[in-house]
Each structure stands twice: as C-alpha cells, then as structure tokens.
Image (cartoon, coloured by chain):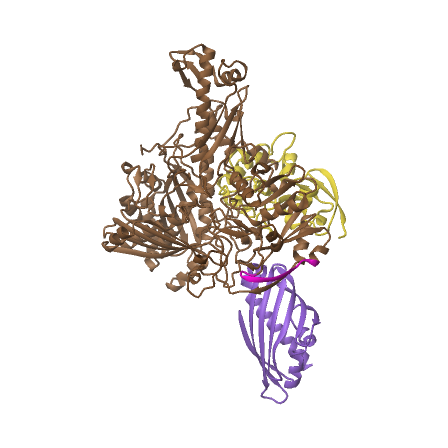
Chain colours: A brown, B yellow, C purple
C-alpha cells in the first residue's frame, strides 16, 4: 500500500470502455445540440408562475402587507403571505442541520432579500408585475452583521424562537482534539506562529439558478416536484415530514442540472412556496429564481473567522496546533453537515502533516444574513481547514527562513505511516504526500523558479511561488458516524441486465454535470464486461431510483460508485451459477475474465455476460429466480482521503496591484481513476473555483446588511481571460477500502488551490514585511499594501 | 398590455408571434418558439448563456427585445447541425470535453461560431478574449479553448472558405 | 450615511421658513419628485423616481415634519419604498439670519440609510449620487427663493 503508480492501464478494451478509458461523455450529444432539458425548459399544461417579494431590510418588523394593488394586476391570481402559511403550520421549515428557517416571515425579516410574500400569476411577466405592486410596511430593527458583535452581551437576540436556554446568538460550540495536549505542545515549542485568517462568504453561482415546478394532482392526491436538487431522496422525506403528505404520494424528479456545487442541496423557501401554490390552485406552479435572487438569498459558503496558533521547533518540526473559529451562519444554520459535525470535517485541519497534538474549537453564530456555511464545491469545511493549515505552514517556513517545500517535506505524514491516525481522530486511508510534491516541483521546475525569483527581486520585480499540499476528506460516510437528520449516509445502486445483454442502472446520487451517465456505466463495464455504451444510467426520479443521500461533498464515487461495483459483483455471482448451468459445469470450476465465465483450463468453454443474461430470462435452472439484477446500499467503512500538491507562480504588477497567475501545476491523487478525461475536467473546474475566491469572489455586506455583490456586476466569476491554462498531472495511491480503489475528486482542486495562490502572493511580498493577506486578494488590497510599504511602479 | 406582431427568421424558418413590447428575445425563442437551447443565466448580460447570432453578429438575447428582432435573422444552437452532421464546434466540444453541466454550452458554442467567423485562426489569447463574455463554472475553460482550436483547424482544413461553412460560422443562413 | 452642509440664501428667514415647511413648495425641489400628496399639516406623501447608475426605481415616500420650531429649526423624517428597496432619512435644518441683510444661513444635516436592491447594486455609486441629489435640492430651493 501507499505505493505510487504513475499509470493505470485499462484492463478492458476501448469497445467495452471500463475503468481507465477516456470515454467521451454519453450525456454530451444532447447538450451540444441545445437539447438538454433543464428545469426552466419544462413546460406543463396550465402551468402558473410564482415570483417572490423580497425584503429590502436586513432586519425589520413587518407591520402589514398590502397586496390589494397586486391582486388587480392582470394575470395575478393569488398572493401568499406568512400569515397564510401560518394557518397551515408551514411558515417555518427544518434545515438539514437540524435548525429551522422561515418559509415566509409572519413578523420579522432576518436578512436583506428574504422572501416576504409570493405572487402566483399566469405568466412570468405578470408575476413580476405583481411583486412590484405589493406594499409592505416595515419597521427597521438594529442590524447585526459582525459575528463578533453578535456575541457581545448587549447584542439583540436574533432568534428568540429558540428555547429559553438558547437566548443567545451562539448557535453551538464544538470541539475536537486534545486541548491539554495542544496547550502543552505549544508551551514547549521554540516558536509559536499565530495568525487570524478570514475565509470570506462566497456563493457557488452555478450558471443555472435554482427552480422547480410543483405539480399537485388533486384527483390522485399526488405531488410531483420537478426540481434542481442534488439530493432528491432526502428532499422527498423532508417534504413528506413537513407537509404530512404520505411519502408514496410524493415524487421528486430532477432534470438536467446546470451545475450544483452544493448550492442545490438545501431546501429553499421558493420550492416550498411553489408546492403551497400548487396545492392551493391545483395547477402546476413554476418558480425560477433570477441571478440577483440567487446571489442574495440562497445559501452561502465559508464565512469562517479562524485564529491559529502553530507550534514549531527552530529547525521546522511542527509540534502542535490550536484553532479557534467563529463561524458566521447567518440567521439560520442551514448547512448540510452531518448531524454529529456542526463544523463539518473542519478538524481535518492538521492536513498532510504529522502533528502530534491539535485542538480545534468552533462557535456557530447567528447574524442578519442569509443562511451561510452550506457549500462552494466543498460542503464540509475542508476548504477552510486546508486554507488555514497551508497558510500557517507557509508563514512558519518564511518566518523560520526554511524553504516552504522543505518544511512540508520535513513534516509530511510519511507513506509508511498509513493508515494514519490524526490528532483529531481521523484515520487517513492512504497517501504518498512526498511523491506528489516532488512531482509538482519537477514539472514546474521549482529550483529554477526560485533562482528566477531571486534575480527578479534584486531588480525590484515582484514574483511569488506558492505551494499547497492538501489532504481532502470525502466520501461521507460510515453509518456509525454519519447521518443527516438521522438518515445514514450510505448510497445506492440498482442494476438490471436486460435479456439481450444491455442494462440499466439507477443510483441514489444526482449528477449536476459530473458525467455520471458515463462514469457509472464504465464501472459496470469494468465489472461485467458489458460495453458502457450499452448501459443506461438513471438518477433523480425518487419513484424508480433506490434511496440515497445524493451528490455533494465528493461522495458519489466513494459511496454510489462503490455500490455500483458491489451490485455488479452480485450480478456476476449469479451469472456464475447461470453459466455453470449452461456449461454443465461446477460453479467452483469457473473463472471470470473479460466479461465471460469460462471453465478453468478450458478457455474455449465459456459463456459471455450477454449469453448469460439471455439465459436468465429464457433458460434459468429450476429453483433459481429468473432475471439478472441486483441492488446494493453501500455503507463505506471509512472516508477516503484524496490529496495533492499544487504549485503556483504569480507576478504582481506594482502599478496596479494586479496578481497574474503565470503558471499553476496541480498534481492530484484521487486513487484509481474511472475516466481520466473526466477527472481532469473536474480538476480544471475545481481549480477555477479555487482561483475565484483566492483573487476575485466575495459576498460582502455593508453595515445595514445589504449584500454588496448581488449580481455578476460585483460578484466576479472568473472568465477565460483571468483563468490560467491549468497544468495537471497525477499520482495514483488507491484507497485500500474502496472496492475500486477510488477516492473521489470533485472538490479536491477547489480545496487545494486557494492557499497555493495566497501563498504565492505573500511569497512575493514577504521581503517587504507582508505576512498574511486575507482572500480575495484583490488589486485594491495589494495596491494599498504596496503603497504602505513604499513600493511604487 | 398591447402586443405587437413580430416576424423573425429563426434557423432559416420564418416564425411569428404577438408579443408584449417588453418581451425579451430570449423568452420569445424559449417560450414562444420552444427553442429551449438558448439559456438564461443572469440578469445583467454577464453570463452569455443566451448568446445567439443576430443578423450575423453575436448577441446576448436577454438584452434584445423581441420587437427589435422583427425582420431579423437569428441562429440558435438548434440551427447549427446540418443534415444530421454536427457543426465542427459541436463535435469539438464533445471531443475535447469542453462541457460538463452543459448550461453555458449553447451560448459558448454560438459565441465561438461568431469568433471563428471573424478570425479563422485565433491564438489562445484571442480565443480566451473572444469567449470572455461567456461564463462557465464547470470546465475551467482549458478544454473549451482546445475545442475552439480543434474546430478552427477543421474549418480551415475544410476549405476555410466554402460558402456554406463561412455562412454557418458567421451565423447567417 | 451622514451628510451635512451650510447654504446661504438671499432671502429673509421668514420666507425661507415658509418655503421649507410647505410640502408643495419644498417637495417640488426633492430629487425626482413626480407628485406630492398632503395628508395633514405634518404628513405628506411623495412619489419620486430615483436613478443610481443603471438602476432606477420609483419610490413612494412618506414624510413627516417631526419637529417644527419656527423660524429656527425643522426636522423631517422620511421613509420611502420601492420594489425591493427602501430608504430611511432624517434631515434637520437650522435657520439663522445671514451676515447680509435679508439673507438666511441654513445649516443642514441628513442621515440616510438605503436598503435593498438599490443599496446592493448601486452600492459604490450611492454616496456620490446622494451628494449630487442633495446639492441639486438646495440649488433648486435657493433659485426658487431667490427668484
């Protein structure tokens, strides 16, 4: 184990297209023709439109809502307010984190752009006219924007609806690791590096916003909700519990999803309002949010105020880590973290390093902002952890005068230490951190770059080199530890082989562009020898797919991918019995190779999987069930720990403060690879969503709680101009416990990239006395620093 | 609200509708004509998912009123495939893994058809600048750039200038 | 946002006082005001169209003469609403005789809070726009009083 493989040769032919083949994607023919079917493309007969009145105030009492003018607008059919919902007990709903949030307020709005009323009309334009005609009488209340101020004794209690013992803005306090051990380690350290690191609020901004069509059939008493959700099964259960509609009378149906990145996991009030509107009118009701609603009101990620103390010896041996964090959750904890992990997997903050002692504490805090802490291509706070430790290690290296690569090499968990038990309780499954960093250094020409940097610095030019050697933690998760609202975090696959040898597989996860229709077919092709092109993959219809928790947190391959492999192996086991019957041989005398069961020692006596499938329906032995199908609900024994080393080179314009990423090399290790083309695509996208918060994106609020990045005018999603030509490579260290040795890759690059960029910028400026810059590192910030340090163009 | 009658040639077919003066071209294409390949991803003309070819130039159809399209020729993603053969850009996006969720793809491909019509042999920097009005959240643009390069080479090799391709590349019909 | 300033008006204090406390007169100088409806002698309602950068919104503004000490001091409170946006403002005006005969010095201060879409989208333009609007309002008052 822990051996690094540099190539992984496919064992199937390109025609079969099993693991390791760069199979072209099977979903693409519809997308490149404009024939994808996204939620907004779905039109149902008699469908109505819903639009939402939103609060201009971040905190205010609602004294009254006058909808009389709105109801006079041609085409407007109904107005729904919080009081209407209160009558049905639907004005509050549970969040996935066990808190609750308003569907519509009855008395108080808690953030700017909060839903206040819904308009139902016969067209999208009429609905918007109706929204503009609603008059709401507000009395503004004091706004709490700063989570530190929210914890002060005289701060207004934002959530008086909580129990008498919870009349505070502190949502929860969470600890991990050994405080005494960490304190002792730090006290005995030669040097303690301390830093405050803010990881700002950001938004996934998938190019498709959220939306749904709720379709209540009053005759069948059945509700179908077509929606943009990454977790259809969990949503069905939550809808049933909240609405009291029996679960078999609810069908959640996804369509093509235009990007999710975690932003389509939560239940937003708009979905519930569409359901209420359909129940009220007996007609299908469509709600599609526009971009400014999406950027102002949907769930947000990050917003962690981290303080780290890192101990080290003088020669750079890390001794201990202590972390204190304030987590700004907005007015409700609507994160999708597993219930035992209110701060997600943030305690993976010891990262890739053999840190003997660590202690982490996090306080969740309410403020007058929309729910935060959900996801941005990483749901479980791994990005926050990685950014913190990678910044701290870099500061330590610079402060001690040790090359950042050398300090990392010195402190890496070594390949022979796996499975490695971290100071905060995780068992890392496998890894080879030095190999990945060495490879990245070779590709980028690290030593030569350092020479170039020294020359440029002598000439007064600003160039920086930044490293990030991250460890991910994905694939939640083992049922003994992981659940969301009590539902264990297994995932599932059901495979049916048709008589003529083609197949359909249905899974409990949900693609949002990751290419599941291709990769899961490749897993079955690998396991059964059925060509991937003969296999249909279906997800997102809760009436047909087996139950699962959905796609987020890079969990699809570790959980549903494993379920697919195991279900295929169950089919292979039954196929063996069928083959034995057809070959009149003892099952024990058969061996499986390349899609065939053959008699050991007589390779010409065999039955292909296609022949066996036909027999399963036409010629199965007496006493055996007909058919060839299997289902598996996979409960992973552990999480998986993908990792990688990234190196970034930046040049800084002294005149403008602009940071230009000149090169970025990403060496990733996600275990065995199903489709290398898709893995590379995931890394390219992930890197770009790491670049974005490092340099451009942030959701900020003014002191009145107004969102200051509510459109793409101010929320700066990188274009092709800012995005560098990513250079990617791999090492392969299989997961020892995953059936395919795979680990998951969707979020690795988003997690790993920001500190590489931030470290490069600080590396360029350290000699000027710059120690840390919070992301996003905008030209304004750098420009101000350069002027302060007396640097001129 | 009063309506106006508009006639638009879409993908070579004459189409007409009675529309409110405020109706966006994107909504005319999607809701009235059922051409849902043109997507809407923002409300400030930044994302480019709604890009179409409008009288020979690329245009963000969320920023054009339907009444302004009266008498115009519009090409959408649905109009690129000819005689069952994918346009070289469609093929290249597929070959190079230039798409993931597919939502930005129609706009990205339409913008690229216009770009290659203007500049049949663009450098990487010119491609990146050319598609900088189109946001993609999934791909990191690397493979989109490769796809445009592949299509450019193919279009040039196919005779750079056969009337049909020049016309499709420029979005006209 | 806090704004303050001082203007010299070539008109006697009584006339200035009468002007600034008459909704129909002072209202006509408000930025983008389209109509004024007097509810009673202390309350009135204005409709105003305000543009910041590329965004414009039609506000319905309720105004109240919160404090009137003739002919010295007036405080006006305003709360306006537009779809998705709101503005709350308190403006005070202190009048004193100017240095020259038949002139008035008006020391004014305004606290303005803007919320919602306009604050979000027009954020960085608000302060400049507000400054410009206030300037225009006083220019208008002065020119009408001095006419």
Q: How many marks?
A: 0
Q: Is residue B154 left or right of residue A694?
A: right
Is any atom of residue A97 visible in this view? yes
Which residue appears at 46% of the width and 20% of the height? A574
Is any atom of residue A674 visible in this view? no
The answer to which of B171 and A638 lies nearer the viewer is A638
The answer to which of A366 and A42 lies nearer the viewer is A366
Q: Position of residue A682 (x, y in %)?
A: 46, 39
Q: Position of residue B116 (x, y in %)?
A: 58, 40
Which residue lies most toward the bottom here? C101
Which residue appears at 65% of the width and 38% of the height? B167
The answer to which of A158 and C53 lies nearer the viewer is A158
Q: Position of residue A281 (x, y in %)?
A: 68, 46
Q: Is residue B139 above or below residue A296?
A: above
Which residue lies most toward the front here? A164
Q: Is residue A34 above or below residue B47?
A: above
Q: Quadrant of residue B122?
A: top right
| Range of magenta residues | A57-68
Q: Is residue A494 left or right of residue A40?
A: left
Q: Quadrant of residue B83?
A: top right
The answer to which of A710 and A364 lies nearer the viewer is A364
Residue C46 magenta-drawn? no
The C terminus of chain C - image quarter: bottom right
Q: Position of residue A391 (x, y in %)?
A: 35, 51
Residue A65 magenta-drawn? yes
């Amino acid at each position: 184990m822990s051996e690094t493989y540099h190539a992984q040769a496919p064992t199937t032919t390109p025609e079969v297209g099993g693991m390791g083949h760069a199979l072209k994607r099977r979903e693409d023919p519809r997308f490149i023709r404009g024939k994808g079917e996204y939620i907004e493309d779905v039109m149902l007969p008699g469908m109505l439109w819903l639009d939402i009145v939103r609060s201009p105030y971040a905190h205010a009492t609602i004294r009254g809502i006058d909808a009389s003018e709105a109801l006079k607008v041609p085409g407007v059919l109904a107005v729904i307010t919080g009081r209407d919902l209160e009558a049905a007990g639907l004005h509050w709903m549970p969040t996935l984190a066990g808190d609750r949030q308003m569907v519509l307020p009855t008395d108080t709005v808690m953030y700017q752009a909060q839903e206040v009323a819904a308009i139902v009309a016969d067209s999208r334009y009429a609905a918007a006219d109706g929204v503009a005609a609603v008059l709401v009488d507000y009395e503004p209340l004091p706004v709490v924007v700063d989570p530190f101020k929210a914890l002060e004794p005289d701060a207004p209690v934002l959530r008086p609806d909580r129990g008498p013992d919870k009349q505070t803005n502190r949502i929860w306090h969470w600890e991990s690791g050994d405080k005494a051990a960490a304190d002792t380690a730090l006290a005995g350290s030669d040097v303690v590096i301390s830093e405050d690191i803010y990881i700002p609020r950001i938004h996934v901004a998938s190019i498709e916003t959220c939306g749904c069509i709720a379709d209540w059939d009053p005759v069948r008493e059945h509700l179908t909700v077509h929606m943009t959700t990454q977790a259809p099964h969990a949503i069905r259960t939550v809808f049933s519990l909240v609405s009291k509609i029996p679960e078999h009378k609810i069908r959640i149906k996804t369509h093509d999803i235009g990007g999710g990145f975690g932003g389509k996991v939560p239940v937003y009030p708009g979905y519930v309002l569409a359901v209420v509107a359909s129940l009220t009118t007996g007609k299908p009701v469509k709600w599609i949010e526009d971009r400014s609603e999406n950027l102002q009101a949907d769930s947000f990620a990050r917003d962690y105020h981290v303080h780290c103390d890192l101990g080290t010896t003088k020669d750079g041996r890390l001794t201990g880590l202590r972390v204190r964090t304030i987590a700004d959750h907005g007015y409700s904890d609507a994160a999708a973290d597993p219930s035992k992990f209110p701060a997600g997997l943030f305690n993976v903050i010891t990262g890739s390093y053999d840190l003997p002692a660590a202690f982490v504490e996090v306080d969740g805090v309410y403020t007058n902002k929309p729910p935060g802490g959900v996801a941005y291509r990483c749901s479980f706070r791994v990005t926050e952890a990685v950014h913190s430790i990678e910044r701290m290690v870099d500061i330590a290296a610079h402060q001690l005068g040790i090359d950042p690569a050398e300090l990392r090499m010195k402190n890496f968990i070594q390949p022979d230490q796996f499975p490695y038990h971290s100071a905060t309780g995780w068992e890392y499954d496998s890894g080879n951190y030095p190999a990945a960093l060495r490879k990245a250094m070779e590709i980028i020409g690290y030593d030569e770059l350092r020479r170039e940097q020294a020359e440029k610095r002598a000439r007064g030019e600003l160039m920086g080199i930044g490293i990030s050697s991250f460890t991910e933690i994905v694939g939640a998760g083992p049922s003994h530890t992981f659940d969301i609202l009590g539902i264990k975090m297994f995932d599932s696959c059901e495979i049916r082989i048709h008589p003529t040898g083609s197949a359909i597989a249905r899974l409990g996860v949900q693609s949002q562009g990751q290419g599941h229709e291709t990769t899961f077919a490749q897993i079955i092709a690998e396991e059964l020898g059925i060509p991937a092109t003969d296999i249909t993959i279906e997800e997102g219809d809760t009436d047909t797919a087996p139950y699962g928790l959905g796609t987020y947190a890079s969990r699809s391959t570790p959980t549903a991918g494993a379920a697919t492999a195991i279900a295929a192996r169950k089919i292979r086991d039954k196929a063996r019995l069928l083959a034995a019957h057809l070959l009149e041989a003892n099952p024990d005398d058969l061996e499986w190779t390349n899609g065939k069961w053959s008699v050991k020692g007589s390779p010409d006596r065999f039955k292909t999987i296609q022949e066996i499938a036909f027999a399963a329906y036409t010629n199965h032995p007496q006493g055996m069930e007909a058919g060839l199908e299997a289902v598996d609900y996979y409960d992973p024994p552990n999480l998986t720990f993908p990792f990688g080393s990234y190196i970034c080179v930046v040049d800084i314009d002294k005149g403008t403060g602009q940071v230009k990423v000149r090169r970025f090399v990403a060496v990733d290790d996600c275990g065995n690879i199903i489709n290398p083309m898709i893995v590379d695509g995931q890394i390219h996208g992930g890197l770009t969503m790491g670049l974005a918060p490092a340099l451009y994106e942030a959701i900020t609020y003014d002191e009145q709680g107004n969102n200051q990045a509510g459109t793409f005018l101010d929320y700066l999603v990188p274009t092709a101009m800012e995005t560098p030509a990513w250079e990617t490579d791999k090492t392969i260290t299989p997961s020892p416990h995953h059936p395919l040795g795979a680990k998951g890759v969707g979020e690795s690059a988003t997690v790993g990239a920001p500190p590489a960029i931030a470290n490069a910028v600080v590396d360029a400026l350290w000699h000027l006395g710059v120690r840390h810059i919070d992301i996003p590192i905008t030209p304004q910030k750098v420009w101000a620093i350069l002027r302060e340090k007396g640097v001129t163009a | 609200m009063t309506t106006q009658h508009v006639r638009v040639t879409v993908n070579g077919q004459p189409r007409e509708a009675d529309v409110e003066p405020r109706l966006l071209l994107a909504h005319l294409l999607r809701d009235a004509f059922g051409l849902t390949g043109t997507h809407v991803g923002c409300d400030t003309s930044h994302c480019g998912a709604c890009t179409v070819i409008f009288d020979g130039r690329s245009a963000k159809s969320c920023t054009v009123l339907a009444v302004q399209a009266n008498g115009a020729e519009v090409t959408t993603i649905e109009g690129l495939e000819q005689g069952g053969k994918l346009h070289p850009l469609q093929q290249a996006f597929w070959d190079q893994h230039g798409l993931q969720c597919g939502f930005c793809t129609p706009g990205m491909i339409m913008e690229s058809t216009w770009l290659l019509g203007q500049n049949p042999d663009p450098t990487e920097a010119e491609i990146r600048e050319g598609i900088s009005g189109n946001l993609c959240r999934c791909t990191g643009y690397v493979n989109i750039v490769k796809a445009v390069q592949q299509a450019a080479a193919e279009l040039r090799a196919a005779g750079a200038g056969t009337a049909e391709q020049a016309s499709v590349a420029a979005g006209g019909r | 946002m806090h704004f303050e300033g001082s203007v010299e008006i070539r008109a006697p204090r009584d006339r200035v006082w009468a002007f600034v406390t008459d909704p129909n007169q002072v209202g006509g100088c408000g930025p983008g005001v389209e109509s004024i409806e007097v509810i009673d002698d202390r309350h009135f309602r204005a409709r105003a169209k305000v543009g910041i950068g590329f965004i414009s919104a039609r506000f319905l503004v309720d105004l109240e003469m919160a404090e009137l000490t003739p002919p010295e001091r007036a405080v006006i409170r305003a709360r306006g609403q537009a779809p998705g946006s709101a503005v709350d403002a308190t403006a005070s005006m202190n009048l004193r005789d100017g240095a020259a005969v038949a002139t008035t010095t008006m020391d004014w201060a305004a606290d303005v809070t803007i919320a919602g879409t306009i604050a979000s989208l027009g954020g960085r333009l608000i302060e400049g726009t507000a400054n410009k609007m206030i300037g225009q309002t006083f220019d208008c008052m002065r020119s009408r009083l001095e006419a």
